[in-house]
Image (cartoon, coloured by chain):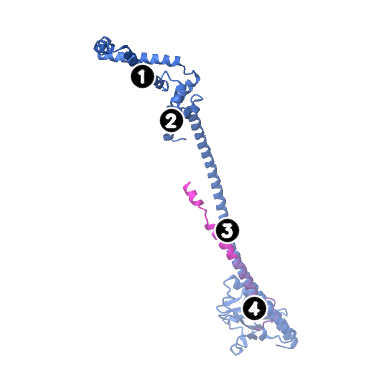
Amino acid sequence: MIDNKRKHKLIVLSKELNDLLNALHESSKKIDKVTPKLVLHNTAVYLWRNIRTVKGLLTGLGISAGWIIAYTADAFHHLLNLPASSILVLSSIIILLSGALLRNLVLNEMSTVSSEMFHLGVYEKRNRREYLSLISMAKEKDFILTLREQLESELNEDIDKLKSELKKNKEVIEQKYDAINQKDDALNILIEELDRSEAAAIFFKEKSDFMIDILYQLKSKLNLLVNDQFNLDNIDFGSNYTLYKVEEKGLSIIGAYGINNAELDVFIPIERENNPYIRSLKKNQSNPFILTDFISWKRTLQDGSEWIMSLHLDDSNRDKLNMKIETGKLNVTITQEVLWICCELLNKFADENGGS
Amino acid sequence: MGQVDKDRLYSKQLSDNYILKHKLDNKRAREKALKALNDKHNLYVKKADS
């Protein structure tokens, strides 16, 4: 909508200017030429109107025409005494001056828009610049009024259109905003997934390193086996261990790695119930006996013999073989399997060679 | 034990380098994503005004 201030200005402009232009328009319909007859007619009307006005004024002041004639009789009396030629010259001058003055006054009246005597031709001659400025707008009636109405209508229409476009654009911005939010959410999820995937990749990389290391160790053991050099001294899994064989009355030592054999019991009787190796008799590889630095379990080998396999932990592998965490459990399981297969090989070749 | 094959095709260093390379790629991608997330294009201001 147009604001009230602008609307008021438009109304003032149209009201003032429209009347003027309409007067010009009406006058332009009557295209009479400025003839001497018209000027004389208008002069007569002008004189008559002014005489009536003066007469009315004098009457109002209580002055009669007779009084004026009587008062000015002396002046005219002296004039009448002048020679006829002087009277003629003087009369001519007075008539010419009066005529010129009267003509000018009448033409002024004819070029005044509000006057009944207004004539467009006279107005054009006497106010040419104004005429040229206004005449093009006076070709149709109510030009300014029509223009104002059109302007108001278009402005209102433009504002409605702009409001509609603004509303649409706001909706588009909202949609884009929502789309950006969705993308932000997706990015945040991707970043979180990236972090998790990276952590998982590092986890599996460590496992892979561990498994590959075990594989190379196995290859090394097989080499030793082929060369008849395979014995307990060669079985190293990164942790110290002891091996006992289950017998009827207790456990007899097979061997150890990283442990001083002199510190180990050659035979542990079954009656020593608190001995960790004896306690391991009731445990298996999936549920081993666990102390702070000790993991032990019983395993039956393929020839039916039962062995107690025990890992001795230290600072170098305590974290790696920590059964309280998943990776530690996995490492222990792998170590158990590798130790078991080595024990199988050791047992088999020891038998063939008549003891290790 | 403790023997290391001289002709080992696989080494820990190899896997370390592989992981490191991917970690660097991930770091770049993460930084780019975070930069995009932090760039609000003044839309949040407009949202607040509306």
In the image: residue A342, left or right of residue A314:
right
- Residue A18's place in the image compared with A90, above or below, is below
Q: Which mark is residue A13?
A: 2
Residue flagged by tag 4: what amino acid is it?
Answer: Lys
Residue A290's spot in the image, x, y percent?
A: 58, 76
* Cα separation between marks 2 and 3: 65 Å
Residue flagged by tag 3: what amino acid is it?
Answer: Ile
| Neighbours of disc 2 within 10 Å: few (<14), some (14-19), many (20+) | some
* Cα separation between marks 2 and 4: 112 Å
Q: Which mark is residue A189?
A: 3
Relative to the observer, which residue lies in front, A337 or A64?
A64
> Which residue is the site of mark 4?
A298
Q: Nearer the viewer, mark 2 or mark 3?
A: 2
Q: Which colour represents chain B?
A: purple
Residue flagged by tag 2: what amino acid is it?
Answer: Leu
Where are the magenta residues, as a range? B26-50
Q: Is residue A288 visible?
A: yes
* Cα separation between marks 1 and 4: 152 Å
Residue A217, quarter of the rendered image: bottom right
| Neighbours of disc 1 within 10 Å: few (<14), some (14-19), many (20+) | few
Residue plotted at (48% across, 23% down): A25
Q: Earlier in the sequence, mark 3 or mark 1?
A: 1
Q: Secondary structure at mark 3?
A: helix
Residue A133's spot in the image, x, y percent?
A: 47, 30
